[in-house]
Amino acid sequence: MARMKFLCDAERCIECNGCVTACKNENEVPWGVNRRRVVTINDGVVGAEKSISVACMHCSDAPCMAVCPVDCFYRTDEGVVLHDKDLCIGCGYCFYACPFGAPQFPQAGAFGLRGKMDKCTFCAGGPEKDLSKEEWQKYGSNRLAQGKLPACAEMCSTKALLGGDGDVIADIYRQRVFKRGKGSEVWGWGTAYGKPDQKAAPAGAKS
Amino acid sequence: MTAARKFVLVGVAVLVALGLGACGERDQVTVYKQGKYQGKPDTKPWDNDPAASPYPGSKWNKGEKTSWESAVKTRNLAQNEYTRAE
């Protein structure tokens, strides 16, 4: 398996916020924290309005991981970026480093008290016993341990939000672009560099 | 030496040992290694029993990575409505 990724099709997203609601419900995310949100540009401009659902992108070279002073981040075998809340000191460096604004901090009490960082886990829980009460309380649902994919992607009504193995969702998206005949936004590691199971073209062959 | 005196001596020895032990110094902070994950180890999703879930999803052989991957891939392909409609 390659890496777990999200891909949001801006041509399909209708800003229903169903993914946000699904995430909130699945993980019982506290008030004030949004692991996922929908961003809209050109709001109200006919033909130019585009929406995209954004959460942690589980970067291959994650800046949050690089800046964390207590090294509480780790990457799983499936490429999911997770963190240990027992180590997190809530400093907020990851928030400043993240280009997507994925790290969130629960705010409670006076003087803007900042709690430990919370972010999208790709519904993969965290460093506690899988499907345990502790894991649920700290990190939310662990759907990967149940053979499922993130709730936001699986319930997306227009299938704008795809989540799963990067190569598989890139294939789905490519087929979609070919069918509808528009969009040159096909991207992904497999698209750019070929898949591991594809044989390299013989030298001198014309493409 | 009377029994009472022995008892007092043993008591004092125990108290001294406990007192000195309490004065000992031990690390109270995590020793960080730069650039290395310092937290608790995580378990692999395929090491779980698929039947253990209260709401079972895919089925795979416990502990088999390839089996879990193929189960998740099948589920992943369900996001492609073109194949579902055909």
Image (spheres, helix red, strand yellow):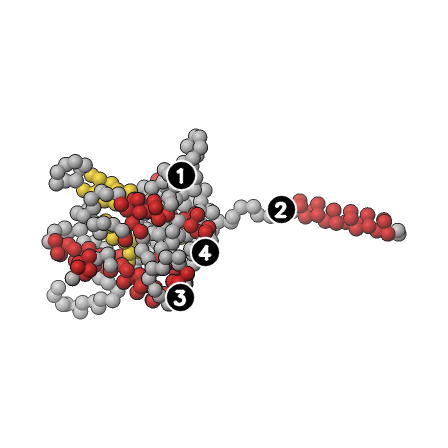
Residue A183 coordinates in the image, percent (x, y)? 14, 50
Label 2 chain ID: B
Q: CA distance from mark 1 to mark 3?
A: 36 Å
Residue under numbered circle 2: B25
Label 3 chain ID: B
Give the foreground label among 1 and 3.
3
Query: Is B36 left, or right, of B10 in this rendering?
Result: left
Label 4 chain ID: A
| Mark 4 on the same chain as mark 3 | no
Hey, what amino acid is under mark 2? Answer: Glu
Residue A31 coordinates in the image, percent (x, y)? 37, 38
Residue A129 coordinates in the image, percent (x, y)? 45, 56
| Mark 2 on the same chain as mark 1 | no
Residue under numbered circle 3: B62
Q: Earlier in the sequence, mark 1 or mark 4?
A: 1
Hey, what amino acid is under mark 3? Answer: Lys
Describe the element under mark 1 as helix, strand or loop.
loop
Residue under numbered circle 4: A129
